[in-house]
Amino acid sequence: RLRERLLREAQSAGILSHPNIVTIYDIAEENGMAYIFMEFVNGPPFEKMLKVDKTPDKETLLSIFRQTAAALDYAHKKGIVHRDIKPANIMIHEDGTAKITDFGVAKIMSQQMTLAGTMMGTPSYMSPEQVQSTDITGAADQFSLAVIAFETLTGEKPFAAEYMPTLLYKIVR
């Protein structure tokens, strides 16, 4: 499964060329091990930036959201939905450039890449259609980015629960 996920990430991200998406250079397999060669982002994930005492200023935050939204728009126009947009998958280069990474659960819209009824993604950032395993479009990524914006601005996730079924119910309702 990990090999398939790696190959899927390379396939998805490999057809994307955008300044706010981590570039996939090559993929190789040797002695039963699969390797992916990708751009190095010299900076932390957005998740780490949110956990420090002093969060970034509003201009920096708006820039990160704008860049991420532009990259998602580009991917969606190419027929790719990321399906796991979360702070850990947005890298922030030391020059302030935001770059989306981890297209491992991405879905190319023209293909069925997961079994029907299978949820993919990180629960707190999932869209209602992901929870319900219905058709996934770019709106799912937009929903996840909105969850990140809400969390960044308020310090809390918009949907929280002690138990997974309760969390999923809140997202859907």
Image (cartoon, helix red, strand yellow):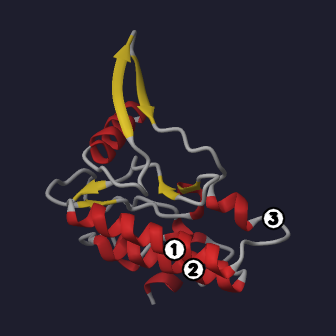
Whole-angstrom CA distance, mark 1 to mark 2, is 8 Å
Give the residue at the far bottom of this rendering: 173
Q: Residue at x 29, y 64 (%)?
A: 74
Which residue was labeled with disc 3? 52
**What quarter of the picture does the N terminus occupy?**
top left
Give the residue at the far front of this rendering: 95
- The answer to whether 14 is drawn above or below residue 128 in the figure is above
**What is the x, y in percent for residue 21?**
41, 53
Residue type, mark 3 in image: Val
Visible residue check, residue 167: no
Residue type, mark 1 in image: Phe
| Rendered image: mark on residue 65 | 1
Q: Residue at x 35, y 18 (%)?
A: 29
Pointers 1 and 2 in contact (CB under 8 A)?
A: yes
Q: Residue at x 43, y 30 (%)?
A: 37
Indicate the secondary structure of the residue bearing disc 3. Answer: loop
- The answer to whether 69 is drawn above or below residue 3 in the figure is below
Residue type, mark 2 in image: Ala
**What is the x, y in percent for residue 57?**
71, 77
Residue 6 falls in image quadrant: top left
Visible residue check, residue 125: yes
Q: Nearer the viewer, residue 85 or 91?
A: 91
Whole-angstrom CA distance, mark 1 to mark 3, is 18 Å
Give the residue at the far top of this rendering: 31
> Which numbered disc flags the more N-terminal residue, 1 or 2?
1
Indicate the secondary structure of the residue bearing disc 2. Answer: helix
**What quarter of the picture does the C terminus occupy?**
bottom left
**What is the x, y in percent for residue 66?**
47, 74
Mark 1 packing: few (<14 Cα in 10 Å), some, or many (20+)?
some
